[in-house]
């Protein structure tokens, strides 16, 4: 099954005409459904990039917030002002923050605990993972392997991958999103690269908080499997494991 991912908010630049900013958001088109994963840090930038990508509000049927940091949730106001008839999924740790936001009073909010939730056929939320910063990652079953999408991967990729394989016992062949490696040393990143390769990851599109050093090392190690990701980038992933 073909999955179409468009990066809508990122501090790295992608396609010309898209605005960048520190934060993350991507739109995932799967069949007739559309999932907005995170909303970035700025309403104006997010709406500009949505318009540039020609993504209409009615195409968004679900919104997932990976965690409650502002660089992943501040654009939510702009989205809600365009449309209110969709489901917003967030972790229970975000409940107090989101319930106090006036613009969300009449929006359908679903709070997720540590258990996985299937939000669309073949699309799952891991449930909240991690200790200090609890975070949800999104999993997609393409029929030929799993795609993992992360906001910041605060829980760590080893924990995320472990949970992913408990939910769907299949190989993980693609990883997209922020990986929070900007403060890691080179040897730590090399160790993570070996882990990803041992897990069968063939394609990686790291952005946001991944850090320049990690991106360079990923590009060197994954070669054609490294996907340059930034605001406006479009990524096609299918069950044949081809990008």
Image: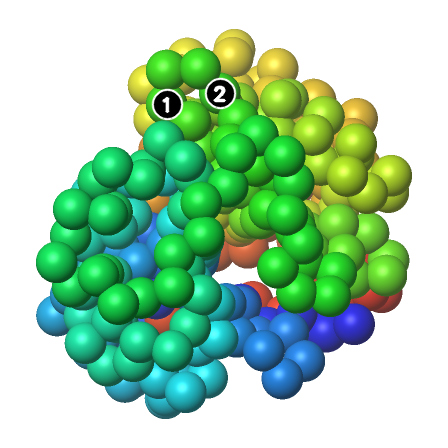
Residue 208 point in image, percent of width and height: 34, 44
Which residue is disc 1 drawn over? 133
Residue 169 point in image, percent of width and height: 87, 39
Q: Residues within 10 Å of mark 2 (few under 14, many from 20)?
A: some
Residue 58 point in image, percent of width and height: 41, 87
Indicate whether 97 appears above or below 130: below
Residue at the spot x=38%, y=78% of the render? 85
| Label 2 – label 1 distance at C-alpha | 6 Å
Which residue is disc 2 drawn over? 130
> Which sits in the foreground, 100 or 219?
100
For the image, the number of numbered tags is: 2
Q: Could you say which quadrant of the image residue 209 lies in?
A: top left
Q: Residues within 10 Å of mark 1 (few under 14, many from 20)?
A: some
**Which quadrant does the C terminus fall into?**
bottom right
Q: Secondary structure at mark 1?
A: loop
Decide if residue 217 is in sight here: no
Q: 90 left or right of 95?
A: right
Q: Could you say which quadrant of the image residue 120 lies in?
A: bottom right
Indicate whether 64 appears above or below 1: above
Instruction: Residue 187: give its label.
Output: none
> Which sits in the foreground, 99 or 41?
99
Residue at the spot x=23%, y=61% of the render? 104
Q: Are marks 2 and 1 in contact (CB under 8 Å)?
A: yes
């Amino acid at each position: 099954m073909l999955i179409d991912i468009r990066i809508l908010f990122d501090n790295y630049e992608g396609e010309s005409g898209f605005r960048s900013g520190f934060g993350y958001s991507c739109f995932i088109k799967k069949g007739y459904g559309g999932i907005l994963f995170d909303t970035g840090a700025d309403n104006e930038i997010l709406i500009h990039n949505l318009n540039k990508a020609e993504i209409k509000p009615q195409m968004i049927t679900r919104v997932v917030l990976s965690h409650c940091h502002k660089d992943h949730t501040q654009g939510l106001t702009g989205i809600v002002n365009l449309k209110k008839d969709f489901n917003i999924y967030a972790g229970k740790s975000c409940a107090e923050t989101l319930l106090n936001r006036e613009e969300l009073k009449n929006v359908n909010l679903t709070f997720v605990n540590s258990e996985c939730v299937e939000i669309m056929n073949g699309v799952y939320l891991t449930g909240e993972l991690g200790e200090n910063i609890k975070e949800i990652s999104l999993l997609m079953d393409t029929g030929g392997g799993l795609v993992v999408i992360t906001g910041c991967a605060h829980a760590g990729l080893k924990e995320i991958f472990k949970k992913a394989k408990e939910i769907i016992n299949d190989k993980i062949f693609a990883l997209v999103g922020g990986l929070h490696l900007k403060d890691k040393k080179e040897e730590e990143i090399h160790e993570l690269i070996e882990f990803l390769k041992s897990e069968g990851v063939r394609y990686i599109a790291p952005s946001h908080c991944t850090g320049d050093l990690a991106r360079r090392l990923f590009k060197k190690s994954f070669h054609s499997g490294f996907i340059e990701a930034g605001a406006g980038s479009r990524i096609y992933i299918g069950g044949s494991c081809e990008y």
